[in-house]
Every structure is written in C-alpha cells, then in structure tokens.
Amino acid sequence: MTGGNGDDYGVVGIFQRLLDLPDAVVMEVIAIVMGETLGSGSAAVEAVGMEIGVDMARCWRATTPFSHLSATGKC
C-alpha cells in the first residue's frame, strides 16, 4: 500500500474506488492505511486521530506489562 510503484494512475484508481464507498468503509480503510504509514507516537498520528475522532478506549486496553512499564517510566 505505501511503497508504491511509480504509477500515478494506480493511485487515481484507488481514489476513485474510495469515492464510491460509504463513509464508514472509507474510515475502516483509513485506519489500515494509518497503521501502515504513520509513525507510532508521532505528531501526525495524534493529529489524524483527533481529526477523525478515534476513541482509543474502544480499540485498546493496557496490558499488565504495559501498565508496569508505564508506571516505572520505562515506556
């Protein structure tokens, strides 16, 4: 998805296909593309998440190891 092949028309085809999809489906696609392309913890991820209204509490729960690392400042 992110590597591309230098074919600008391929991107146009993807864009045209996205235009035909319902908004809910496009949002699912955006989530996958974000996961594949944006750097974890980056300002870009934060900005996109805020714009599209990601509710992380619905998608993610801290695990015991994460909680431990977070509490000890190693995360």
Image (cartoon, helix red, strand yellow):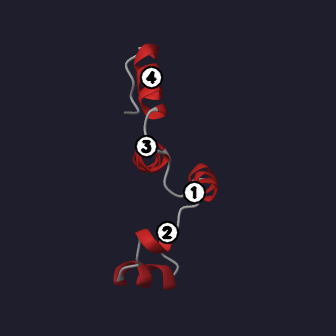
Find residue 24 and report its horizontal and vertical position in percent.
45, 51
Q: Mark 1 points at which residue?
A: 49
Choose between 30 and 47: the one closer to the eye: 30
Q: Which amino acid does label 2 sit on?
A: Met
Are the residues at dot 1 and dot 2 in contact (C-beta closer than 8 Å)?
A: yes
Mark 4 falls on what kind of element?
helix
In this rendering, is residue 22 above or below 17? below
Pick whichever, 74 or 51, lies toward us: 51
> How many neighbours does mark 4 have within 10 angstroms: few (below 14), some (14-19), or many (20 or more)?
some
Q: Tell me what residue is drawn at x 39 percent, y 47 percent.
A: 32
On the image, numbered disc 4 is attached to which residue?
A: 11
Asked if the residues shown at circle 2 and circle 4 are in contact, with their CB atoms under 8 angstroms apart, the answer is no
Residue hosting label 3: 33
Relative vertical location of residue 43 with respect to residue 26 in this rendering, above or below: below
Marked residue nearer the N-terminal end (1 or 4): 4
Q: In which quarter of the image is residue 65?
A: bottom left
- When asked about the image quadrant of residue 5, the answer is top left
Residue situated in front as seen by the camera: 38 or 28: 28
Does the image show residue 75? no
At which x and y percent is residue 59? Answer: 42, 68
Q: Which amino acid does label 1 sit on?
A: Gly
Mark 2 and mark 4: Cα distance apart in space: 29 Å
Q: Which residue is label 2 attached to?
A: 56
Q: Tell me which label, 2 or 4, sits earlier in the chain.
A: 4
